[in-house]
Amino acid sequence: MKIIDRIQQCTSEGSIPFYSFEYFPPKTEQARDNLLDRIDRMAFNLHPLFIDVTWGAGGSTSQATLAIAGHAQKYSGCEVMMHLTCTNMTRAEIDTALEAAKKCGIVNILALRGDPPAGQERWTAAEGGFEYACDLVAYIREKYEGYFGIAVAGYPEGHLQTPDREEDLCHLKHKVDAGADFVITQLFYDTAQFKQFYTRCREIGISCPIVPGILPIQTFQSFERMTKMCGVHVPDSLIEELSHIRQDDEKVKQLGITFAANMCRELLEFGIPGLHFYTMNLERSVGQILQALNIAAPRAGPWRTVAGREDNEVRPIFWSCKPKSYIDRTVDWDEYPNGRWSDSRSPAYDFGYHSVNTQKIEPNLDVFRKQWGEPQSIEDIREVFLRFLGGKIQKFPWSEEELVAETNLIMGSLGDMNRKYLLTITSQPQVNAAPSTDPEVGWGPENGYCYQKAFVEFFCPPEFLPTLVQVFARHPTLSYIYTNAQGPVQGNMKDGDVNAVTWAIFPNREVKQPTIVDLQSFAAWKDEAFDTWTSIWGWIYEEGSRARTLLQQVKDTFYLVSVVENDFVKGNLPAVFEEAFAQLPPVQVL
């Protein structure tokens, strides 16, 4: 789809502001592979309207540009715009590049004159080539008619080689009149300069969209080099702030994020519908700027994105309510390939367990006692689970976050389970082809469909387990596993089985399966799940107290059970538990 059509669609539908990202081809093959991963991740997490890939001077990165742009167009789910310059390019070479872009499915071009090649001070046109960007625009329009969408560059403070700003504005109008659809500007740090530029563009008849280019400050050295190279004005206040922290890269980066976010707010309030970020192939600053503006919707999947594990696209569902604990649990593990924990033969597999201590979360134990009381019986414990489900308490031993919206869909059946002493800690509803924009179960890019198998995990009294296993065994579509604190893990899943319990289908992407169930991860998770009874909950009470003793008994005797209903179309997991409820023996008094 042409980017201009997407911009107009955003404007007509009121779905603005939009934003886009620029990348450049790295020099090494390994770096290019890493960039492709980053593009895919940023596209999936942040949903830019489009991305663009630069073209090295004289076509020096032409093959890498085409490879990166083609991959992104095919796999990232983003619309891709490829840069194309006149530098050292004959008409025949221009045609070769455009035909290659067509083969990759690319329909958007940023037409530029380009910088002089390395070692050449003055820019000169190649023999048989084009001297100005407006000539390149006109040629693409004439030869390829309406096939390509075309963008051109604008310079809020004037081009270095055209110090007369009015003359430079005339050059921009020539490019737009030649057939350009919209304008992306060079970077700037003075919003007043951009506003003057924008106003003059409108006054001289440039009516197409003008998207400001934003370059977050990453380091003082790169900022100084870029601003001098581009000849952009830097406000005195920014220079003053940077001068005090120039040696501290982290502080410079944070200042850059804050400054860019403030710039963007001012531009959006001015009425600019979109922003274009020069990422410099970096991810963190752009993501934080968008979050600061509250315009990004990073819904990578059912898992909340957490620092340190952003690269993991597939994770065990057991940690769905405890992402921070998941990070702590796996920080020293090997990579997590093919939706499974690392090979158990790996020397990093059994690195030792570090439980999340309550004191790390909240030093004021009265906060927890107020939430959870001092349980004296199994009924008191059950009440804490029910109160969390009902939203009456916000803190819960097995969850670092509040209940997610999808829990509302199964709240009734979860309540029934807990009232029967099946104490639920993780669950998800059954979903069959819900739109990815669904407010309760949707995730990922637009125009996709989401699927989920019904899943529930709970603690149960030991006297319940034989009845539950008998009932589960009568339902061939169920997968179930269980264990107590001492182990082993049992059930009808075999070692090596990996059960995808959440997945989705998006345009131009492979099937995404972000959450799974498998025996290795369950065996690892069960240690934390059982330990939570005493390390987080029981820890807040005095040693020897009834509450602490009771929670220790639950940890020592109860079972942890995980159940998946594999029939996500006609399955009825609540009915299975209704069947079990009628046969459960009375709960024993602890």
Image (cartoon, grey):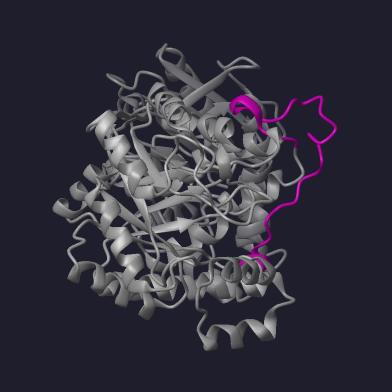
- Give the residue displayed 49% in from the left and 29% down from the top: 71
- The image shows residue 85 at horizontal and vertical percentages of 47, 43
User: Was residue 346 drawn as part of the magenta stretch in this picture?
Assistant: yes
Identify which residue, 450 or 78, lies in the foreground. Answer: 78
Of 197 and 265, which appears nearest the observer? 197
Q: Quadrant of residue 506?
A: top left
Prevailing secondary structure of the magenta residues: loop
Figure check: 385 above or below 83: below
Give residue 68's position: percent from left, percent from top.
53, 34
What number of labels is visible? 0
Image-quadrant location for residue 107? top left
Residue lying at the far front of the rendered structure: 127
Please tell me whether residue 111 is drawn above or below residue 74 in the rendered image.
below
The spot of residue 495 in percent (x, y) is 65, 17
The answer to whether residue 168 shows anywhere in this view is: yes
Q: Which image quarter holds the N terminus?
A: top left
Q: Which residues are magenta?
A: 334-361
As drawn, the residue found furthest toward the right would be: 347
* Front-most of residues 441 and 93: 93
Which of 142/369 is in front? Answer: 142
Q: Is residue 241 left or right of residue 389?
A: right
Residue at the (71%, 63%) spot, across then down: 544
Report x, y in % for residue 441: 32, 40
Q: Is residue 312 among what the camera can see?
A: no
Q: Is residue 477 magenta?
A: no
Residue at left offset 59%, top offset 37%: 61
